[in-house]
Image: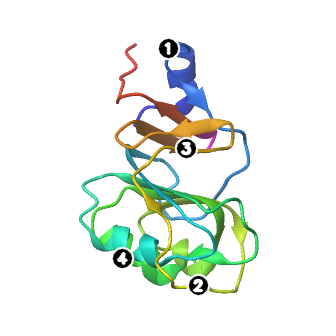
Amino acid sequence: MTKTTDLCDAHPELVRVCDPIFRSYGARVVFDGPIATLKLHEDNALVRKALEEPGAGRVLVVDGGGSMRRALVGDQLAALGAKNGWSGVVVYGCIRDSADIATIELGVVALGTHPRKSDKRGVGVVNEPVTFAGVTFVPGQHVWVDHDGVVVTERRVEVTG
């Protein structure tokens, strides 16, 4: 996979770089894919619904409003995402079951962990642009995640040489 640093060097005009606020939790530390988005607050019913669908290498970007009061992804949802072919999940909020998620072949980055589960009301917005960490994530655009950060490009780009 192309490194985020190489993308920034080769295509500075195309790359939008997230503020360095995320920690990596999944067994897959390096991942990328087309963006699918959710916007919700302390309610992960739509996260489950999305991860039940075929991922086809996409990355689910979850705008949880930065809430540090409840977890939006746990080990069961991470396993579901891995099983259904998602490349990863970017959570602007918390996850739980982090030790178990570390063994699941899915990319997972989040602000932190919290042991409390989320609500299950099914309230939120699906596949609309979301903005956090200084970047707007647009469904269908491409997100890249590795040890050095999270970056977004309008489309998948290659770095040569």
Q: Marks 1 and 2: CB-CB under 8 Å?
A: no
Q: Nearer the viewer, residue 142 or 30?
A: 142
70 vs 39: above or below: below
- Circle 3: residue type: Asp
Residue 113 x, y percent position in the rendering: 71, 72
Q: Mark 4 points at which residue?
A: 80
Q: Which of 21 and 2 is in front in this view?
A: 21
Task: Give neighbour class at mark 2: few <14, some 14-19, many 20+ (Cα, 10 Å).
Answer: some
Disc with the residue nearer the chain's start (4 vs 3): 4
Task: Tell me what residue is drawn at x 67 percent, y 59 percent.
Answer: 65
At mark 3, the secondary structure is strand
Lower sequence index among marks 1 and 3: 1
- Which mark is drawn over residue 119? 2
Disc 4/disc 3 C-alpha distance (Å): 22 Å
Q: Return the x and y of residue 157 as percentages of the image width and height.
A: 36, 24
Which mark, by number, is residue 146?
3
Q: Mark 1 points at which residue?
A: 10
Q: Do the residues labelled 4 and 3 touch (CB within 8 Å)?
A: no
The residue shown at (36%, 28%) is 155
Residue 13 among magenta residues: no
Q: What residue type is labelled 4?
A: Leu
Quote the CA–CA distance across marks 4 and 1: 35 Å
Up-down relation of residue 139 to residue 63 (above or below): above
Stretch in magenta: 146-150
